[in-house]
Image (spheres, grey):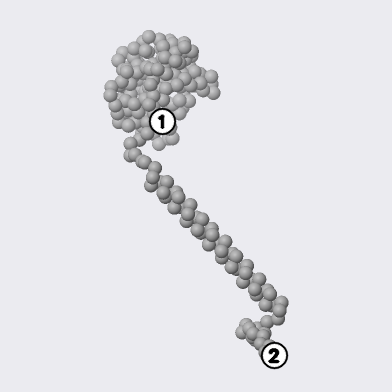
Amino acid sequence: MAAQRAPRVVAELGRPETPEETAARKAANSKRHRQNQTTLNLIFALIASLVVVLVIVLLVPRSDTPIERDVDVSAIAEQAQVGASAPLVVPELPDGWRPNAAEIRTGSDDITAWYVGMLTPGDEYLGMYQGFDANDTWVASLLARTLATGVVEIDGVEWTVYDNRESGDDVGNARYGLVTTSNDTTFVLLGTASPEEFATFATAITPTIQAQ
């Protein structure tokens, strides 16, 4: 009969482990192993996700050309004219002007306006609002409640100027603005474009203004 092997002496204890201590040690080792496996699985899953994202980014075609909406102002105006009380502005502008919005808008003050948004040849923004039965409060809200700075005549039409280009206040897109009224229709031009580009746009809509 083989001799029974003496229990292993644990250095930390200076004596052999008891059955309870052996069971506890094995349970702790098993728990650490499971935790390590879980951590490794999470790391592998994260790496796999990053690889998938990288592949998608590399496969999706990209372009340095800004995305612009193809907006047919004339066609939209023709459809919207049915509900308008005056002829809607369809500006005829030189090459380089790109419309990116055209729609009827109704604000919280119940003022209805025909809106046309443009990108200028200088890649700046110019928006036009043609408001019907508008009031001073509506105009002030569009122009960030800024004050008029002068008057200018463009192609026979007198415009009130709102020049906020040197202002340190947050005026949004109302860096520069022009306002004129013809009968019951108010025209508000605003944006980041230059005064010369504003003058070009104002000249383009003069026939519509004079027809109000």
Q: Which x, y percent locates residue 174?
A: 41, 29
The image quadrant where one finds the N terminus is bottom right
Seen in the image, is 148 located left or right of residue 36? Answer: left
Q: Earlier in the sequence, mark 1 or mark 2?
A: 2
Disc 2 marks a residue whose amino acid type is: Met
Residue ID at (69%, 77%): 21
Residue 173 badge: 1
The answer to whether one can see residue 145 in this image is yes
Seen in the image, is 7 located left or right of residue 63? Answer: right
Residue ID at (38%, 47%): 58
Q: Secondary structure at mark 2?
A: loop
The image quadrant where one finds the C terminus is top left
Residue ID at (40%, 46%): 57
Q: Which x, y percent locates residue 135?
A: 48, 17
Locate residue 74: give its quadrant.
top left
Q: Which x, y percent locates residue 103?
A: 45, 21
In the foreground, 64 or 29: 29
Q: How many marks?
A: 2
Disc 1 marks a residue whose amino acid type is: Asn
